[in-house]
């Protein structure tokens, strides 16, 4: 009896087939979904954030390498972003110039008080540094101490005061603005068309001539304005004498 076939091993090969539900395609789809959700949340967060954060994010996408550090600082709120060197220098220069104008104003106020002839007028001079520059205002009183009433004719003390101011401000390179202001009392000159605008303009020109007589260069004057009663100092009382004034401003250089 032949038993050779009974001892031969039988080898079965089982081929594994990956079904559609058990493949890896779903992982890619899930990753895309998560990425989209993250992008949505980031957009919603940016829209609800401050303008600084929005600018930081926009700056990053424009220049990822150069802006990444500033964006991180802004978003985390740890400190202000690094300031451009040019802007820093401009701010420093303006601060130095502001201090120079303050010293000029203090020196001028001191010299006006030293002149006993001008003492009563000096009390009506207000000197302060504003956003535009060093502002020197000569504020009138009920006694009309600067101009003859209703005219652009300066009184002698007022001329001397303006000449002294011109001498001091001529030491600086700053451009000058001269302004004339009146109260709301209407100028009565029927039929001529002469109004407070003409009066305030002529008073500003008269002040300019006295400034030049004191040493101010014509080329240093950049603007002369007559505002009539459109910029009242005392808005509660448009007829108040303090609204009648001459304003001289040394503008910031930058």
Image (spheres, helix red, strand yellow):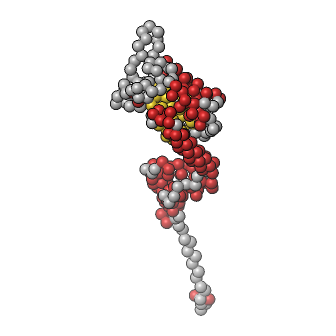
* Residue at the image point whose x is 43% and y is 29% from the top: 140
28 over 145 or under it: above or below:
below
* Residue at the image point whose x is 48% and y is 58% from the top: 77
125 over 159 or under it: above or below:
below
* Residue at the image point whose x is 63% and y is 55% from the top: 65
| 209, 111: nearer the viewer | 111
Among the 4 quarters of the image, the one containing residue 123:
top left
Question: Percent x, y for residue 212?
Answer: 61, 28
Image quadrant where one finds the N terminus: bottom right
Q: In this view, does 219 lie to the left or right of 232?
A: right
Question: Percent x, y for residue 192?
Answer: 47, 9
Q: In this view, does 240 lie to the left or right of 7?
A: left
- Considering every residue shown, the one lying at the far left of the view is 236
* Residue at the image point whose x is 58% and y is 52% from the top: 83
| 134, 155: nearer the viewer | 155
| 61, 228: nearer the viewer | 228
Image quadrant where one finds the C terminus: top right
Q: Can residue 227 be seen in this view?
A: no
Q: Is residue 86 visible?
A: yes
252 over 162 or under it: above or below:
below
Question: Percent x, y for residue 228?
Answer: 45, 23
Question: Percent x, y for residue 208?
Answer: 57, 26
156 over 134 or under it: above or below:
above
| 233, 71: nearer the viewer | 233
């Amino acid at each position: 009896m032949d038993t050779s076939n009974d001892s031969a091993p039988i080898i079965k090969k089982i081929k594994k087939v990956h079904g559609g539900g058990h493949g890896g395609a779903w992982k890619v789809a899930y990753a895309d979904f998560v990425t989209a959700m993250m992008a949505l949340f980031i957009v919603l967060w940016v829209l609800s954030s401050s303008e600084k954060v929005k600018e930081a994010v926009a700056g990053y996408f424009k220049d990822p390498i150069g802006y990444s550090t500033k964006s991180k600082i802004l978003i985390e709120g740890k400190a202000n972003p690094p300031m451009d060197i040019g802007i820093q220098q401009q701010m420093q220069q303006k601060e130095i110039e502001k201090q120079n104008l303050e010293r000029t104003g203090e020196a001028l106020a001191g010299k006006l008080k030293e002149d006993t002839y001008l003492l009563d007028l000096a009390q009506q001079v207000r000197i302060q540094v504003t956003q535009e520059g060093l502002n020197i205002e000569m504020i009138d009183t009920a006694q009309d101490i600067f101009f003859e009433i209703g005219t652009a004719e300066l009184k002698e003390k007022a001329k001397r005061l303006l000449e002294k101011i011109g001498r001091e401000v001529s030491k600086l390179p700053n451009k000058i603005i001269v302004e004339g202001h009146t109260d709301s009392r209407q100028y009565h000159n029927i039929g001529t068309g002469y109004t407070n605008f003409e009066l305030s303009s002529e008073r500003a020109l008269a002040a300019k001539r006295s400034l030049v007589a004191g040493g101010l260069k014509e080329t240093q004057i950049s603007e002369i304005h007559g505002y009539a009663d459109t910029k009242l100092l005392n808005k509660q009382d448009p007829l108040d004498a303090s609204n009648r004034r001459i304003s001289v401003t040394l503008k910031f250089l930058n």
